[in-house]
Amino acid sequence: MNDSRILIVEDERITALDIKQRLEDMGYKVTGLASSAKDAIEMTEITKPDIVLMDIMIEGDMDGAQAAYHIRKLFGIPVIFITAYADENTLKKAKLAEPFGYILKPFEDKDLYTNIEISLYKNRMEQKLKENEAWISATLKNIPDAVITTDITGKVKNLNPMAELLTGWKESNAVGKQLTEILQISYSHGEIVNDLVHRVLINGVFKTNEYEELFLLKKDAKIPMRISINPPSLGLHSTKI
């Protein structure tokens, strides 16, 4: 039996009760019925649903799109819009709230079920991704070597404390910048290495050996380094010789 908890936000009582009955027939637990944005936000905090079904055009100072934005921002709970409107302005409003689904009235039970299940799955995957990123960040902070991770385009995702020390960049300032913006590496003969990430994508790995010297270039120093880059994280591991 499905034990997912759902909050319904709908200002037409008969419609709200109909949706409630449909959900309960599918095995979901309805945590409450809200008829305004204010009630929706308060009931989300109190009942802690797994998902919120939201009518965009609810009465009050805030519409459903604004309520959905606050719910997502405050509680991280996914919202599915249910609406009779599919005009350009309504769609623009909906996009700003980043809903997990969009169901047009009138709808079939299968439309409701499919949107809910996909949204629940997507939210679980997002939570796992956030947990993995938090774990990676915590692990990097305890590695004694300098470690920089990037995406496949070379944009920086993480710097651990030793990497901050060596590069002179704070992680908060470096994230999102190209690796070449925060890190300048050269061979002993002076040639600048600008394609570290590209080399990894082509060859699968980049690693200095005992006969090859690379240097981290800084304004007032030229620091000898040993470097290895290994996918899939595309982490740059460097240790001062």
Image (cartoon, grey):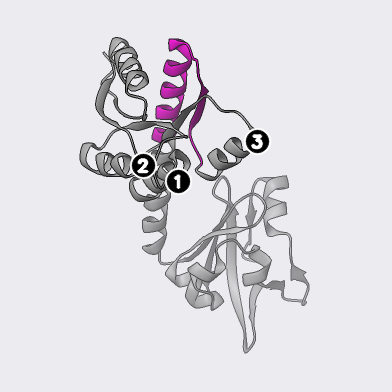
Q: Amino acid at mark 2?
A: Ala
Provide residue 114's location: percent of width, then percent of height. 46, 18
Instruction: Specify the segment rendered in magenta.
Output: 98-124
Q: Earlier in the sequence, mark 1 or mark 2?
A: 2
Residue 196 appears in the figure? yes
**Quarter-of-image position of residue 183:** bottom right
The answer to whether marks 1 and 2 mark residues whose Cβ atoms lie closer than 8 Å is yes
Q: Earlier in the sequence, mark 1 or mark 3?
A: 1
Provide residue 103's location: percent of width, then percent of height. 50, 23
- Residue 37 marker: 2
Q: Secondary structure at mark 2?
A: helix
Residue 212 appears in the figure? no
Q: How far is disc 1 from disc 3 in space, using C-alphas? A: 17 Å
- Residue 159 position (above or below residue 229): below
- The residue closer to the viewer here, 171 or 99, is 99
- Residue 66 marker: 1
Q: Earlier in the sequence, mark 3 or mark 2?
A: 2
> 180 left or right of 90?
right
- Residue 144 position (above or below residue 99): below
Query: Is residue 122 one of those drawn in magenta?
Result: yes
Residue identifier under label 3: 88
Q: Residues within 10 Å of mark 2 (few under 14, many from 20)?
A: many
- The residue closer to the viewer here, 119 or 71, is 71
Q: Residues within 10 Å of mark 3 (few under 14, many from 20)?
A: few
Q: Amino acid at mark 1?
A: Gln
